[in-house]
Amino acid sequence: MESVNILGTGSAMVTKCYNTCFTISSGKEHFLVDTGGGNTILSNLEKLNIDIGNIHNVFISHRHNDHISGIVWIIRAVAQQIMNGNYNGNLTIYCHKNNIDIINTISDLLLDKKFTKYIGNRILFNEIYDKCTVSILDLNINFFDIRSTKELQFGFNTTLKNGKSLAFFGDEPYNEELFEYANNVDYLFHEAFCLYSQKDIFKPYEKHHATVKDACENASKLNVKNIVLFHTEDKNILNRRKLYTDEGKKFFAGNIIVPDDLDIIEL
């Protein structure tokens, strides 16, 4: 059975949790979705007992540093294992052309050649485009352009081996052009930058983000069964789950999941 390992739940400038990223996991294999902004990606993988040698597929949704910068650490860790003879197979990074250029550039700037020499032979890029499908963990992962208002960004949906469906929109809210990818899904992964009641404090709309109210209204319109709220502020993180759930259930009758870093969601 697949599960989601939550590596981070926060937005760009959080200090009390890590930036939003997670794995879809099946058995010992893990599909990594975004990488956050630093090497906390490595410590959180370790805390969840996820060996870098069991990650062979990574998706980077867009170029913002809280989503892409951690890939440098993944590349270094994988390259180190290759050098030590401990990594079987290849690492494939799925992203659009702009992100490929960025990852190549920052890797060349920040990593020694003993690591970057594996890019192109054991560490590979798979350029994605709107409405393309690839097989990862024996799942058909359907990538799509989310029609971002600020930055080229991709999301995906898939049907799990147990027949349940999942959709991920990156770090921007649902828009009507994405209806076909999320209608009636079992799990909708939707960013929720802050409570609607605190919109004047955090100003989510200026940043092209949604509130808990917005996300849950979208889940209700889409008739989804479970909504997972992430990419949040962290000012009251100890009470975040209760606060977000309490606001969300006013607008969505389904199941609301507000994970903490290192939580595991059994799908």
Image (cartoon, rainbow, N blue to C red):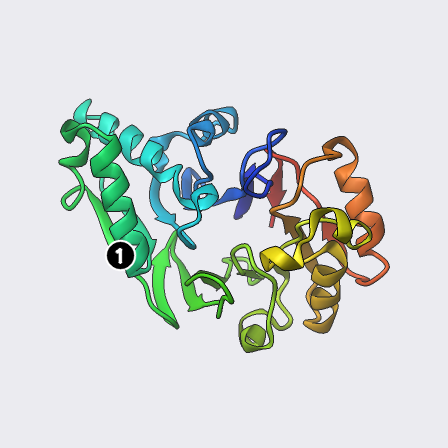
- Label 1 Cα crowd, 10 Å radius (few <14 / some 14-19 / many 20+): some
Q: Is residue 147 visible?
A: yes
Task: Give residue 179's quadrant in the image.
Answer: bottom right
In this view, 116 is above or below 230: above
In this view, 192 is above or below 243: below
Q: How many marks?
A: 1
Q: Is residue 88 visible?
A: no
* Residue closer to the observer: 174 or 48: 174
In the image: residue 163, left or right of residue 252: left
At numbered mark 1, what does the secondary structure look like: helix, strand or loop?
strand
Amino acid bearing label 1: Asn
Residue designated by label 1: 126
* Residue closer to the observer: 234 or 225: 234
In the image: residue 11, left or right of residue 65: right
Residue drawn at the location 15% of the way across and 46% of the way down: 120
* Residue closer to the observer: 195 or 25: 195
Residue drawn at the location 26% of the way across and 31% of the way down: 110
* Residue closer to the observer: 212 or 202: 202
Residue drawn at the location 59% of the way across and 60% of the way down: 208
Residue 6 location in percent, x, y?
Answer: 56, 39
In this view, 220 is above or below 50: below
Residue drawn at the location 69% of the way across and 52% of the way down: 203
Farthest-out residue, top: 84
In the image: residue 143, left or right of residue 232: left
Residue 199 location in percent, x, y?
Answer: 75, 53
In the image: residue 93, left or right of residue 204: left
Residue 244 location in percent, x, y?
Answer: 78, 47
Residue 149 location in percent, x, y?
Answer: 51, 67
